[in-house]
Amino acid sequence: MQIMAEPIYTVASDSETTGEDRTTSTFPEIAVGIDIGTSQCSIAVWNGSLVELLKNTRDQKIMRSYVTFKDDTPSGGVSNELSHEYDMLSGAAIFNMKRLIGRVDTDPVVHACKSLPFLVQTLDIGVRPFVAALVNNVWRSTTPEEVLAIFMVELKMMAEYQLKRPIRNVVLTIPVSFSRFQLTRVERACAMAGFQVRLMPEPTAVALLYAQQQQQAAHDSMGSGSEKIALIFNMGAGYCDAAVSAIGGGVSQIRALAGSPIGGEDLLQNTMKYLLPNSESIFSHRGIDEIRRMGLLRVATQDAIHKLSFQSSVEINVSLGNGSKLCKVLSREEFEMVNSKVFEKCENLVKQCLHDARVGIEDLSDVVVVGGCSYIPKIRKLLMEISKKKALYEGIDPLEAAVSGAALEGAIASGIGDPFGSLDLLSIQATPLAIGIRADGNSFIPIIPKNTTMPARKELVFTTVQDNQSEALIVVYEGEETRAEENHLLGYFKIIGIPPAPKGVPEITICMDIDSSNMLRVLAGAALPGAQHPATPYMEVKMPTVDDGHGWCAEALHGKYGATMELVTLRKKS
Amino acid sequence: MRSCGLALSGTDSRCYFPATPPIFSPRRASNSQVSFLKSPRPPSACVRVKAAFINDAVVSDAVEVSFYELLGVPESGSMLEIKQAYKQMALKYHPDVSPPGRIEEYTRKFIKLQEAYETLSDPNMRALYDRDLARGLQFAFSSRKRCYDHEEMEEKSGWRNRWQDQLSGLKRRSMNRDSKANMSWGARMRRERDEIHKEDA
């Protein structure tokens, strides 16, 4: 049970005093932009004329996303400096938490994290995994939310010190593939850090930055600034995202989004397995020795992959302890071959996104490739091939793009004006995943389709499967899979008091509403055809309602109630 | 046109006009949930109720203007004009730029604006809308009940589009390691929609 318990969190209160004691500024508070990546994080703010990334005391704009636990006091990569890279691999450092947040232990992404040099344990029962750092030979459990909150507290303290004002509002970038349940976890981490947050999918932040640059260029050339279609591809250590945006007049209108939890971490793990084929069995039980050796291999492989972006082959020479040594020359071709599946997934993601946006490659004005993996020659080649372009867009720093876009959004949302019109911008978002309910047996029936412009309100009519059925179970899912349970469960409730009628007659309307703050509400009501009023007042439920480990609850409900509370879509009547 | 010429022969009318093959899939349904309670000519008595009680909060201030009036473009406006007008209006009425305290009002306005834009920026939808407009039925255009029909979707699931060739079932499988070879419902619907566009073009 200890595994399930939410650890008591203490860091947030430390920081709150730091900021709150300062004299509050009379200027409107400008929200800062924060990008917490799987491996790196950064913070940026609109300084009155442009976006500026803040640096830590070691003059770094891009900081490592990890937390080390020493004597139970956690400290993160923003403030802390490791004496050596290998310290990060002693078992005391936790990282890659963006990959784990809001995932249960049946998720393949969680299983892939088990080769990280700290403890990730799974029981495969649909609860959160057990994550722990080795502190003085004792496992100290933590959660992805806690680790994310520690980064944010450190970034907050750093920014408050430099900007000399308290910071409460933040635009935080997130991967496209995050479910709404994962978003609630991210929001919890933000609350721990004392932030009010707006979440922004990473490629949409990049699209906003691109929109600003195009707007600027249109101003400078006195042109009208016709519409441009941009393809954004963002691949970091943990996630890969694509977006197609229609940009004109300072407005970025997201036409389609696609995302997947694949990233540099997969490239790294595949390459590690290739270099040391029996690595999994060597590292299967987590002693201090195994963790250290796993860490050594990891650092050496990471280094080799970085070098392969700039040279065609690399020599790996690393001692793995116990007298064993790894000596190998790895060529770029081998690296690409070992990771061909990952690159294929990237390709599919981009093609899917272009397809969903109903955009042909001839319509594309620019292809913007950002994120840590954008340096990999194969990725660049792939994007150029798909788009049939000879060059990729050059005007954006790949590592600073997302955080800069988030800072722009923060400035726009704060409502501050800019005399030069640099902030006359708008990002029109679209839903990254479809939202719908379980009906027609075990099918997922979307009500708000994927890539619907937000805010949005949509409804669909269902009916009963039994004569005189008086109750119906509404199980809300988010995703793209045909079978309901393969999607993310957001919650469930039942509507009662359906008026007695033969099956197929009552009209049960399910309406879904996403407001401007991305809050989802589900409204449900039943009526007989031709009625002037619904039979019962409609129910309105905010989603998501579920916590970890509820995936199997929906199944249990259906096991218990069978078809007695099911719904089917209302067919046309002939 | 295959449509029987009724005002609502668009997206969601298939429940009522079963003989008519759908011109657009339900996915196409623009933000049709901004219903117009005061709609002068409800297409079918039974449709109205749900829209009415669910959309209570939304409709109260609906002043009935056409999509063209909403966007401020003439009925002869070009695609470029419509796109530019939409972006300019979005800069004014998106809830992100709303003054404090008026977010709900701006949200309603924006959803209407979006429906107008989605309708007029799609040549087929615009043609249908223009016809409804000519008959004075434009306010019924958006007040349709959305039904869902499996058979029709299955029928069309074999259709192809230009990206489809590249998204072979095999690749699709490799993308989602747990998913079936079939495309998702959403993907299938989008494909269907695109196919209709191609066919009509």
Image (cartoon, rainbow, N blue to C red):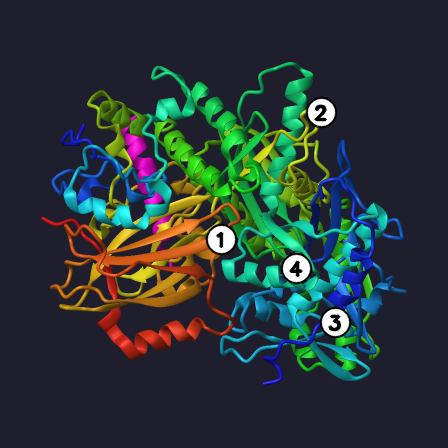
Q: State the CA–CA distance, disc 4 to disc 1.
A: 16 Å
Front residue (pair B36, A508): B36
What residue sits right under mark 3 in the picture?
A: A10
Q: In the image, is B144 to the left or to the right of A418?
A: left
Mark identifier at residue A519: 1
**Amino acid type at mark 3:** Thr
- Where is residue B43 shown, x and y percent of the image? 17, 37
Q: State the CA–CA distance, disc 2 to disc 3.
A: 43 Å
| SS at circle 1 | loop
| SS at circle 4 | helix
- Where is residue A453 shown, x and y percent of the image? 45, 41
**Which chain does the numbered disc 3 sit on?**
A
Q: Residue at x 57, y 57 (%)?
A: A261
Mark identifier at residue B142: none
Q: In the image, is A186 to the left or to the right of B197?
A: right
Magenta stretch mostly in which secondary structure? helix
Q: Is residue B161 above or below residue A187?
A: above
| SS at circle 3 | loop
